Amino acid sequence: MKITDKVKNCWACNQTDVSKTPFIEGWGHKLFDDLQIQVCASCGFGSVINELSGESLDAYYDEVYRSSSSPMYFNFAQQRPNQLEMRAYAQMLLAKRFINSGLPINILDVGAGPGGSYHAAREIFPNSKMFFLDNNIEIITYYKKWFDVTVLEDLTTVDEKFDLILMSHSLEHFSANGMRGLLENLRQCLTENGRLVVEVPHCDFRIASHLDGIERVNDTPHLQFFSIDSLVNIVSSSKGLSIEFVDSVGRILNSRMPNDMPELRRASKLRIVGHDHSIVKFRLKGFMKNTAKFFLDKLYLSGIAFKMYHVILKNALEHDEFNYGGDRSAIRAVIKKSEHVK
């Protein structure tokens, strides 16, 4: 299933000062157990060396990533959207700084997940026309139930042009070669004054706590690991795109560092089975939220009360989505289409 194990120049900056580090498999799935990551000492970029086949990744996402036992599980058949997703509001507000038109715009969310961008877009860009990109039947059914959106299944056959394209925590799931082609497709879908807002996990391998720290338990199932410098390099080397804004955002990263790689792997496995206190608290919080949501749904509360529920129980501690700078959990960028490219 592994196509190659050859170390090459850094894919982001083309420098030769590269090394290898083990992939930390944090979700208990054998597909990622023996992977190696190429690390660039110059720009901090990390990229999986042992490129996985498309069939293996498709099976992983279908059978593991979206399963009920996955930390990323969302029941599209039963759950309803969060009307106040703070990350989406922060992303839309940032985009608003660079899209000055007061007219309705076309917005595309690539990999919209539970659709948190929908209500944020409606508030910040009134009368905008929304498009979601996904080809999963269950997810498409969910979108049609809850949102007034046009669902696209293939970016390469789209005739529309978009004033704003959002790609939040998706780029890291693509192979290096696939990422380059995707950025080109996105560029072609932008209007001349359009903007692409990209958010990826922050993992700068030049920083010790990123290379050897407890945050590495979040490796799975990422294939690319971005520093700010490497993201800038990748965009700058892509035809017809340039960075307009980039910074770290979100929660301050955990600086605790295991003593060695075996200890980090042990911490990763403990986190999976629920012995890590932070995960226990996370699951308890999720249980409380879901219980409260059940009773609120049964009471058929008004839209205002439903929004208040989300503010109190889900978003009260998510203000970090509006905080930039420092060693934070994500990188958020605004990318524009270069004027000289047609």
Image (tube, rainbow, N blue to C red):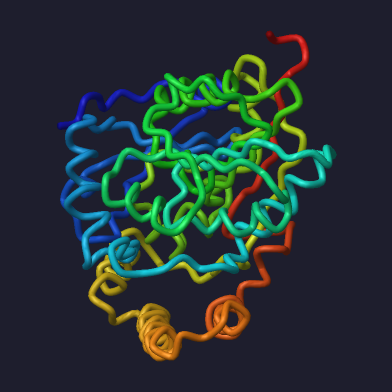
Where, quadrant-wise, is the C terminus in this rendering? top right
**Residue found 51% across the figure and 55% down from its top:** 210
137 vs 322: above or below = above
**Residue found 46% across the figure and 37% down from its top:** 39
Q: Is residue 38 visible?
A: no
Where, quadrant-wise, is the N terminus in this rendering? top left
153 vs 320: above or below = above
- Left or right position of 139 against 90: left
Instruction: Report x, y in % for residue 85.
Output: 57, 65
To which quarter of the image does residue 56 belong?
top left
User: Which of the two residues, 87 or 279, is positioned nearer the viewer here?
Assistant: 87
Instruction: Report x, y in % for residue 310.
Output: 56, 78
Instruction: Report x, y in % for residue 248.
Output: 67, 53
User: Which of the two residues, 337 or 17, is positioned nearer the viewer here?
Assistant: 337
**Residue found 57% across the figure and 59% down from its top:** 329
261 vs 45: above or below = below
The total of numbered circles placed on residues is 0
Q: Is residue 42 visible?
A: yes
Instruction: Report x, y in % for residue 214.
Output: 43, 65
- Left or right position of 147 against 5: right
To which quarter of the image does residue 69 belong?
bottom left
User: Which of the two residues, 98 or 330, is positioned nearer the viewer here?
Assistant: 98
**Residue found 56% across the figure and 82% down from its top:** 302
